[in-house]
Image: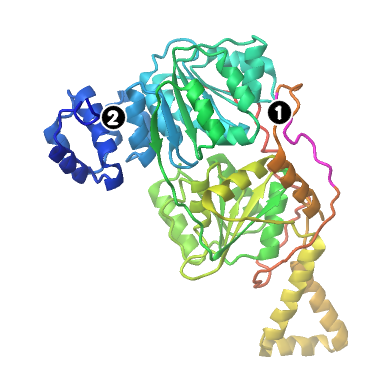
Amino acid sequence: MNEHSRHPLKTCDYLVLAAKIGVDDRHLWTKAILIDYCFCFKYAHTFTLQNLLQRSTPMTFQDFNFKDTLNQAIDDAGFKEPSPVQADAIPLILEGHDLIGQAQTGTGKTAAFGLPVIQQMLGNKGVEALVIVPTRELAMQVSDELFRFGKTAGLKTATVYGGTPYNKQIERINQANIIVATPGRLQDLLQSKRVSINPSFVILDEADEMLDMGFLDEIKNIFTFLPEERQTLMFSATMPKQIKILAEKILKTPKSVTITKSERTNTDITQMFYVVADYERDDALLRLIDYKNPKKCIIFCRMKKEVDRLSSYMTAQGFKVAALHGDMEQKQREHTIRSFKQGLVEIFIATDVAARGLDVNDVSHVFNYHIPFDSESYVHRIGRTGRAGNKGEAITLVSPNELRTIKRIEKDVGTVMVSEVIPTRQEVQTRKDGDLLAKIADTKVTTSGKEMVKTLQHDIDIVTIAHLLATIVQQEVDVKGKDIIGLGSEEVKALIERAKNWKGGDRNSGGRGRNRSRNRSGGGRGGDRGGNRGGDRRGGGNRDSRSGGGNRGSRNGGGNRD
């Protein structure tokens, strides 16, 4: 019996159904069979052929017949329609199949596996689902998203990665239903028999990235500690030979889902990144704004509390700032956006979600206070500049251990971000002085100005008057803060090479020894310092003392979510 004859629908039914739901011709048979099997057969009590053929609207999450608690979580997250990878993968996972999903970061993979897995979880004590990811940053992101999906059902998540105390993580694992872990620390815990887990669902996310980072042996070893009876899902942006071999070993007759993605960045946008320590982000941001003097800019933050803190801090430094995040009422949101569009505020600080739908054509600069977790968010962020034929700059602040994320995003979107060095105080001062001279040369002399000079000449000679006025004006554009911020160009080059070649490291701390310490030489300054200046736009503010600072890059152990 062939693939098509196992299903009750006729060819004409498939064609009509495909036309109704907008199936691409290239995937006609696989999609039609999938819909027939998953919906008409498994969910026959909810869907019939007749009402499927009558559908003229896109698929929604209601079509998956999720539990009420999960539907509530989906509504709370603001999801409307499944992304392509979600529409393809969710029915297969609900059917209990092992799965190979080829999709890039930012296509909605976490929901694609998280929603159907949570749907099938029983909510019993103990770990029911294990997600393995390559990096700590991704582990935190995935854990946060799974927590959002599972919290209405009372599910708990634990994030497990190296560099944090074992005892705390073991305690969290013992309380969790879902674990999100990096390979190094997970292997350590399993090999030492400090934890024993029996998950029904195991997910490998960004498998090719784990291969690039040298985790293949760890992955193979981890699976020797996992039960044979499990549903295993693997997601990878690419499918190199070693990943295919791994899939053959750990997956049982898997189904495949492939989603192509063509996110590309605007060629009118100059993209650059600066490597700084986490505690230097505020200093770096202020120095770059002083140096580049953006006409109108957006600063993107990951979290609402970061938006609020940075907004208060920038306001205290003398900037005209507006903040936007998801907790704002619609009226306040509209007022904030209108103020930014009209130029009443020059700096707009927002989260990714809050900035969706923001349409402003004259944004000259976009700053990423932290690099986004995925390439799609990066493209959407920087797409706020370089519009309507204008040139724009996209500037990203990264810590040394985020350089791999830079390279991954470059690979995903087919772009190149140029490594730059934070300008020194003298470099900024030189540019400001040049701008000031140009402004003086372009300024028309007024009658009141002439009268003031005449009055001063009664007691002071004309040269001294000029010196005094220049001193007063220079004080207004004085550059404050420490001289050297961030890493020098040679240091950055060395770190980039190390990130390319890095294949793991010391296990003694339980982690992978990723960039624990950095030698600072403060050298290698320089580089092209392009950009238009329109004079200084903020007054005073001593940047030697930092209110609300502190190291925001260290998170203690991921934390248990309940």
Measured along the vertical axis of the image, is residue 50 above or below residue 290? above
Element class at badge 2: helix
Disc 2 marks which amino acid? Answer: Phe
Measured along the vertical axis of the image, is residue 530 above or below residue 494? below
Front-most of 269 and 339?
269
Front-most of 309 and 219?
219
Measuring 46% from the left and 69% from the top, which residue is drawn there?
388
Measuring 73% from the left and 90% from the top, which residue is drawn there?
450
Q: Residues within 10 Å of mark 2 (few under 14, many from 20)?
A: many
Measuring 40% from the left and 23% from the top, which residue is drawn there?
253
| Residue 538 screen position, x and y as percent | 67, 63
Front-most of 140 and 203?
203
Element class at badge 1: loop
Is residue 549 visible in the rendered image? The answer is no
Based on the picture, tell me whether residue 516 belongs to the magenta stretch.
yes
Based on the picture, tell me whether residue 194 belongs to the magenta stretch.
no
Measuring 48% from the left and 65% from the top, which residue is drawn there?
387
| Residue 240 screen position, x and y as percent | 54, 37
Q: How is the image coloured?
A: rainbow
Left or right position of 47 against 406: left
Q: Residues within 10 Å of mark 1 (few under 14, many from 20)?
A: many
Measured along the vertical axis of the image, is residue 352 above or below residue 387? above
Disc 1 marks which amino acid? Answer: Arg
| Residue 506 screen position, x and y as percent | 76, 26
The chief SS type of the magenta part is loop
Q: Could you say which disc has been placed on residue 512 in the image?
A: 1
- Residue holding disc 2: 64
Q: Could you say which disc has been placed on residue 49 in the image?
A: none
Q: Which residues are magenta?
A: 511-520
Tell me which numbered mark, 2 or 1, is placed earlier along the sequence.
2
